[in-house]
Image (cartoon, rainbow, N blue to C red):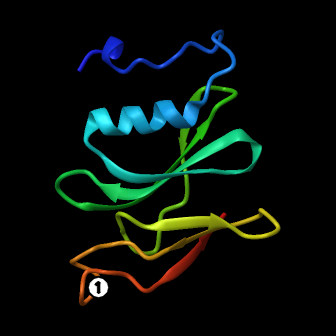
Amino acid sequence: MKSSDIDIPFASQIPFDPHHYIHHLLFLCGINSLVLRTIRNNLLLVGGYNGHETLDTTWIFDSVAWKWRSGPNLIFARSSCCTTLTSDQRYNLVFGGYNPLKFNTGFSDTIEMIF
């Protein structure tokens, strides 16, 4: 894949919705993951499946600086999970998801709180 295949806008092309482009990039890479808008115009990429293993990683995309940084690792690797912000918008709750190696049925009934 070439960088021209990704179709990500330059920072000078405002307004834009980075959420759309992140989903498009993940689709092109074949990554099954969840993206959540967080406070301060960041995007949170949570867990997922890369074709070989279920992931416990999180990544934060700063749409102002247009840069990725690693976030806190999940307690349990999971794909196809759900997440929401707490009412005070201080923490993200990650719940559910799928990981056949960690949970008896493959489906998680756990909740974890990150940053």
Amino acid type shown at disc 1:
Phe
In the picture, measured across the screen, residue 93 lies left or right of residue 35, that is right
In the picture, measured across the screen, residue 79 lies left or right of residue 57, that is left
Q: Is residue 81 above or below residue 63?
A: below
User: Helix or strand or loop: what does disc 1 sit on?
Assistant: loop
What residue do we see at 74% from left, 50% from top?
A: 39
In the picture, measured across the screen, residue 22 lies left or right of residue 13, that is left
What residue do we see at 62% from left, 65% from top?
A: 84
Q: Which residue is mark 1?
A: 103
- Where is residue 13? Give x, y as percent: 63, 11
- Where is residue 71? Give x, y as percent: 55, 53
Given residues 70 and 113, the one toward you in this image is: 113
- Where is residue 100? Give x, y as percent: 22, 77
Q: Is residue 8 above or below residue 70?
A: above
* Quadrant in which residue 97 is drawn: bottom left
The furthest residue to the right: 88
Quarter the N terminus occupies:
top left
The furthest residue to the left: 52
- Where is residue 101? Give x, y as percent: 22, 78
What residue do we see at 37% from left, 64% from top?
A: 80
What residue do we see at 54% from left, 60% from top?
A: 72
Quarter the C terminus occupies:
bottom right
- Count the labels in the image: 1
In the picture, measured across the screen, residue 83 lies left or right of residue 106, that is right
Q: Is residue 93 above or below residue 8?
A: below
The crowding category of the residue bearing disc 1, from other C-alpha atoms within 10 Å (few below 14, some 14 to 19, many at least 20), is some
